[in-house]
Amino acid sequence: MIMKNSKQKVTVIGLGDMGGKLASVLLENGYKVTVWNRDSKKADALVTAGAILAASAADAILSSPILIMCVKDYDASHSILKTNDAFKALNGRLLIELSTGTPKKARKGRELADAAGAGYLDGAILATPPQVGRPDTPVFISGENAAYQKATTVMKTLAGGLQYMGDKDGNAAAWDLAFLSCLFGGMVGFYHGAALLESENISVEDYGNMMAALAPVTGEMIKYEGKVIGNDLFTEVQSSLTTSSVTFKLLLEHAEEAGIAKDWPQFGMALFQKALNAGYGPEQVATVVKVIRPSQECI
């Protein structure tokens, strides 16, 4: 990452593992960083590195034109920002919300910022703290384009893989949750596979290496499923729901044989069976989305 040496002022509120790393990367790149955390001891190392510890959240906000919030969730963020002094201090600042939550909570953040007279961007970090500050660090961000342009230099210092997801405030949170659904859904499957291989005395480390090597192939499969769902191409079949559902039957059979937990294959089989019962068996496996969508009764 190129040293900025700009001495641009930025405030970071929230100094957990991620917030502390954000502040540290900004310091390393020449920013004048003010920090605040409910537990001030978490700022000690950052202060030693050159950060300024504010006496209050309001003081921290007043010290910089750009405020980055990175706390546990939106509720925690809003509880800090809604205090009288902090709320008043937001006027004229740009609030970049990097806490975790839903699109609805992101829109609530916009309402809070608007009421306080602040600009607002909502973001989601798709990385672990050690990955922050790299040229490929991915972050989704959404909100008004004018605000995004003001924040681009700072945010690209933190995440070279910054992606602007549009002017709708909830977009970044929606993209983040969709990413996490795929990531952790896949990880649960990976964990089951690890137990499966352990039961057969096969190296789980080799399994991890193999899945990493196969990432381009699995990525191509996911890309096709997205095309099918996005364009209603369920009759363009590469692998039908009926054929694919056999996988869960085999996983259940093996789990019973090996004595490992059956939670994952039971869950998958139940969802696939719901789609089979609805008559979608001959369609592309992506047809499962039809039984996940809101029912007509809920619309």
Image (cartoon, rainbow, N blue to C red):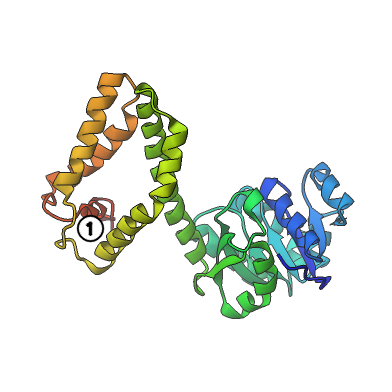
Visible in this render: residue 82? no
Classify residue 70 as left or right of residue 166.
right
* Quarter the N terminus occupies: bottom right
Quadrant hosting residue 78: bottom right
Residue type at numbered disc 1: Gln
Name the residue rendered at 33%, 59% in the picture.
220
Badge 1, how many Cα within 10 Å: few under 14, some, many 20+? Answer: few
Most foreground residue, 61 or 256: 256
- Judge whether 60 appears above or below 250 on screen: below
Task: Out of 265 and 273, give the one closest to the viewer.
Answer: 265
- From this view, report whether residue 223 is shown above or below residue 273: below
Residue depicted at 79% across the width and 53% down the height: 36
Question: Residue at (13%, 44%) from the top-left corner?
Answer: 277
**Residue 53 percent across, percent down from the top left:** 86, 54
Residue 182, given in percent of the width and then of the height, sits at 40, 50
Quadrant containing the C terminus is: bottom left
Mark yes or no: residue 280 visible: yes
Residue lying at the far bottom in this picture: please name it.
146
In the rendered structure, the answer to whether residue 169 lies left or right of residue 84 reads left
Residue for badge 1: 296
Residue at x 65% of width, y 56% of height: 132
Q: At which x and y percent is residue 169?
A: 52, 68
Residue at disc 1, secondary structure: helix
Number of marks in picture: 1
Rendering coords of residue 126 (x, y %):
55, 55
In terms of depth relative to the viewer, which is nearer, 274 or 243?
Answer: 243
Report the front residue among 20 and 207: 207
